[in-house]
Amino acid sequence: MHRGKGMKFVGDSRVPYKANRTKTPPDYSEYPGKTEPFWPDFLLKEWMVGAVFLIGYLILTVAHPSPLEAQADPTNTGYIPLPDWYFLFLYQLLKYEYASGPYNIIGAMVIPGIAFGALLLAPFLDRGPERRPMKRPLPVAFMLLAIASMIFLTWESVVNHDWKAAAKQGAIVETVEFDKESDGYKVYAGQSCINCHGENLEGGAGPSLMNTGLTADEVVKIAHDGIGGMPPGQYKGSDEDLQKLAEFIESLKAE
């Protein structure tokens, strides 16, 4: 190609530009073997790489769809929320003593602000033309520190989270229609059961009582002896009413 007929050569943006209006900028043809036309050569390669990643994401989306949880319940104080994986490092930061509670502003605003501000300042602190990492110690150190911190905090958040409890509290439970005027439900509503298992037996501080698979005898035993986080002796009533309650819970099965 002739001079001035092709694509203009773009230099490194970190090198200060000195205006020289008398000289025509060179095109890529004056750098054989080192540059290529933006259209179609370079742009076609970018599109191909983007297409590969896009197809990969689509395959992962189909193979592993987003997990769904039960409908949000603002009255459920026992629910432990968990952000998406790319926010886990910030979530973990808020768990530390001097970044939570009365110091919440430090964990939520000050520390992330300093960290991201340092990354934004890196290009202004190192304006040299070097591209090799060994010749750019300051930006490389900032980036390695940021990556190491994010990996460590993400890992800490993952290993300290109770995934089994999270799976149970967000599980979609098939509801069963029942009559609130039935004798079994009246016994249930009159006991402390309703405080932990919810007005509609959907669960809360305690698990859902829908589709438990328990027999009436097993329910009676649990009411007397307790199970898991439920202490013994929670039921306060007659054995006759307990039997009605146990049979009511046993009947809560999806057909």
Image: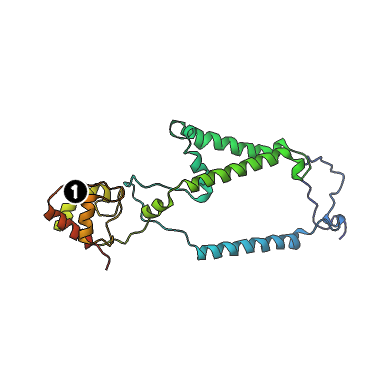
Neighbor class of circle 1 (other Cα within 10 Å; few <14, some 14-19, many 20+) is some
Left or right: 98 in relation to 121:
left
Is residue 13 something that shows in the picture?
no
Closer-to-camera residue (215/106): 215
The quarter of the rendered structure image containing the N terminus is: bottom right
- Point 69% across, 42% down: residue: 140
Is residue 173 something that shows in the picture?
yes
- Point 85% across, 51% down: residue: 26
Give the x, y percent position of residue 109. 52, 35
79 is higher (above) or lower (below) than 127:
below
Looking at the image, how many numbered discs can be counted on the residues?
A: 1
Residue 47: name its quadrant: bottom right
Closer-to-camera residue (67/36): 67
Give the x, y percent position of residue 85. 51, 50
Give amino acid for label 1.
Tyr
Left or right: 132 in relation to 79:
right
- Point 42% across, 49% down: residue: 162
For mark 1, what is the residue?
235
Disc 1 secondary structure class: loop
The quarter of the rendered structure image containing the C terminus is: bottom left
Give the x, y percent position of residue 184. 16, 57
